[in-house]
Amino acid sequence: MSVEPIPRREVVTRSPNRPRKAPVSPPVSAARAAVHEDPRLHSLMRRQLRSSLVGVVALAVPTALLPLLLVLAPASGGIRSGPGLTWLILGFACYPPLVLLGWWYVRRAERHERDFARRTEGD
């Protein structure tokens, strides 16, 4: 008896005879290219970036200071200390500022877009 060699396994992912096609990008219209080169669009993007950075800082600073507040809260004399105060801060006091921050950001973004639309209507 002769032992036959085990054939090597091959993984076939595509036909080896066909060349790979380059991805087709959609054609860029002249109007779209003009909008991307418009300095007013860059102004809108800068205003949106500034608003988002203010929002992130307004969220990050209190979030970073929250552990300090939770450590110092039992040491403050006027409020009953303990886990009840911690749950009150974490469960209820955090949400109104988040809602206000979201409301502020949406209002700013809508105002920026209205201003941009008003500026570009004349074109």
Image: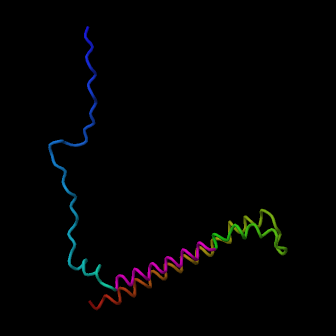
Vertical relation: 111 (above or below) 74:
below
Q: Which residue is at 26% across, 20% downward? A: 5
Q: Is residue 95 left or right of residue 26?
A: right
Q: Residue 106 appears at what percent x and percent y?
A: 49, 78
Q: Which of the two residues, 88 or 66, is positioned nearer the viewer here? A: 66
Q: Which image quarter: residue 13?
A: top left
Q: Split into 4 quadrants, where in the image is the N terminus?
A: top left
Vertical relation: 32 (above or below) 21:
below
Residue at the farthest right position: 77
The verdict on residue 100 being magenta is no
Q: Which residue is at 20% across, 69% downward? A: 27
Q: Which residue is at 45% across, 80% downward? A: 109
Q: Residue 116 appears at what percent x and percent y?
A: 37, 86
Q: Is residue 70 left or right of residue 61?
A: right
Q: Which of the two residues, 70 or 91, is positioned nearer the viewer here? A: 70
Q: Residue 81 appears at what percent x and percent y?
A: 82, 67
Q: Which image quarter: residue 84?
A: bottom right
Residue at the farthest bottom position: 122
Vertical relation: 11 (above or below) 22:
above
Q: Look at the image and give the residue range highlighted in magenta.
A: 40-61
Q: Residue 38 appears at what percent x and percent y?
A: 30, 84
| Number of numbered discs | 0
Chief secondary structure of the magenta span?
A: helix
Q: Which residue is at 85% across, 74% downward? A: 77
The verdict on residue 50 being magenta is yes
